[in-house]
Amino acid sequence: QFEWDPKKKTIAILGTGWGSVSLLKDLDTENYNVVLVSPRAYFLFTPLLPSCTVGTIELRSIMQPIRFLTRFKKREILFIEGNCTKVDPDSQVITVEDSSQVTGDVSVTNIKYDYLVVGVGAENATFGIPGVKEHASFLKEAWDARRIRTQLLDCLESAAFPNQTDSEKERLLHMVVVGGGPTGVEYAAELHDFLNQDITTWYPEVAGKFKITLVEATPHVLGMFPPDLIAYTEKTFAENKVDIRNNTAVKEVRQKEIVVFNRDKQTSETIPYGLLVWATGNAPRPLVVDLIAQLPKDVQNQRRGLVTDDWLVVKGSPRGSIFALGDCSATKWAPTAQVASRQGAYLANLFGHLATMKREKAKLEDEGKSPVDVIHTLPPFVYTHMGSLAYVGGEKAIADLPGNIHIGGMLTFYFWRSAYLSNLFTLRNRTLVAFDWMKCKIFGRDISRE
Ligand code: NAD
């Protein structure tokens, strides 16, 4: 049972993604009242989300209920499944609304905090391009993967429908991925495997018409990887007959076609599609945009997210009471799971120190120092990059590792798999994912629609 201790400071944590969950895992809850707020009552292992869109892995295998974590901390955490709709930085209060479809008489509550940790992640960037929100599928959340899986199978069944015209078959079986970042590349790779290993078996009459196109606005996919790994990925895609359209920006999305502009040829073209997956990166959530607007403009000057100092304190937040981590913050590091989880572990350590330095705090406060000066007496966040991995299809992966080590191929694929397996949240997740991989190898993917 969660018990509020008025003698202890309250930390409110927003989000159940990489940053917040890593903080929760390591945080000593004896020292604080801890309130966790998120509309998502589970942690999702996002690096394996593309695998769920085609059924290589089942969604439940990469989800872990958050109460599993909150129940077993030394002092219990209060978990509220809801949306934080407002942060009032001056009065240090958050407003939370019940996010369930079925709500009770009470569905809004206000919580006073001493420290707030914002780890709400980001939305999908659409750059205001018309039609994206209406017609494209994103790939960020569990429900996105479920929706893509259903749509993909819909396209296959409709293409296989008796007397379907050839041009309509071609359209329905054209899978277009927009955005050549790691998300788009890994999704296209999974689609290729699905085609090669399953569609040819279960839909032989239409398999030959199945086509995958990856549209990227810049000259190459995977801009953040070294040139040799980019070349390796583009070569692997060419061998796998996945068409990469570099230097091509999507300008408009219609119900059955996209309008693209080729920057080399300076020409526009319409491309019909059956399924359109949109993976063009991150944009800040409305809560973050609203919070930025309440803080001083001279320090909160980034559109990407909340600007923090090296201790992850949100610049301009009163008394240094707000921290931000992960994709909702604008830092010098890429918005990756790796960075967010390191930041979470760092903050857990920082809160541990803050709880034990009462005497130092009192002394500094006597000297007229503000709470943020106390935080600045602690070591800042330091990030050591452990490398980047990406799956490129056909049981091949690429790895950009520290020490300028760049590798790609089948061995890297096994390294990719073992790295992800060992990083999964619990033994339960590890077991489920390992079984899914085995099941897929022996029986193929499940092509039934839910
Ligand atoms: P991203 O920002 O890395 O890539 C988006 C791509 O979309 C860019 O290459 C951009 O040029 C392109 N784009 C933008 N607008 C376009 C348009 N109108 N038409 C065509 N192309 C357009 O996005 P992401 O792949 O979602 O990744 C987000 C973050 O998560 C990144 O920091 C990434 O490194 C990280 N991530 C890492 C991994 C991994 O390491 N395996 C996996 C997934 C995500």
Image: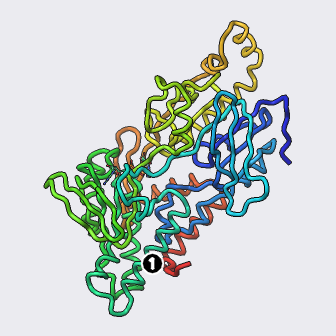
In this rendering, would 45 be left or right of 388?
Answer: right
Percent coordinates x, y for residue 192 in the rendering: 36, 70
Q: Would you call the spot at circle 1 few (<14 residues within 10 Å), some (14-19), or many (20 or more)?
A: some
User: In the rendered structure, which amino acid carries the disc numbered 1?
Assistant: Leu
In this rendering, would 80 be left or right of 384?
Answer: right
> Observer-nearest residue: 34 or 306?
306
Give me the residue at 63% from left, 24% from top: 318
Q: Is residue 445 above or below residue 145?
A: below
Q: Is residue 411 visible?
A: no
Q: Is residue 388 above or below residue 59?
A: above
| Residue 354 picture quarter | top right
Give me the residue at 32% from left, 73% from top: 174
Query: In this figure, which colouring scheme has been used for the structure?
Result: rainbow
Residue that carries the numbered disc 1 in the rendered image: 153
Give me the residue at 78% from left, 32% from top: 31
Give me the residue at 48% from left, 45% from top: 336
Percent coordinates x, y for residue 86 in the rendering: 63, 40
Residue pushed farthest bottom?
162
Percent coordinates x, y for residue 339 in the rendering: 51, 40
| Residue 11 picture quarter | top right
> Observer-nearest residue: 230 or 332?
332
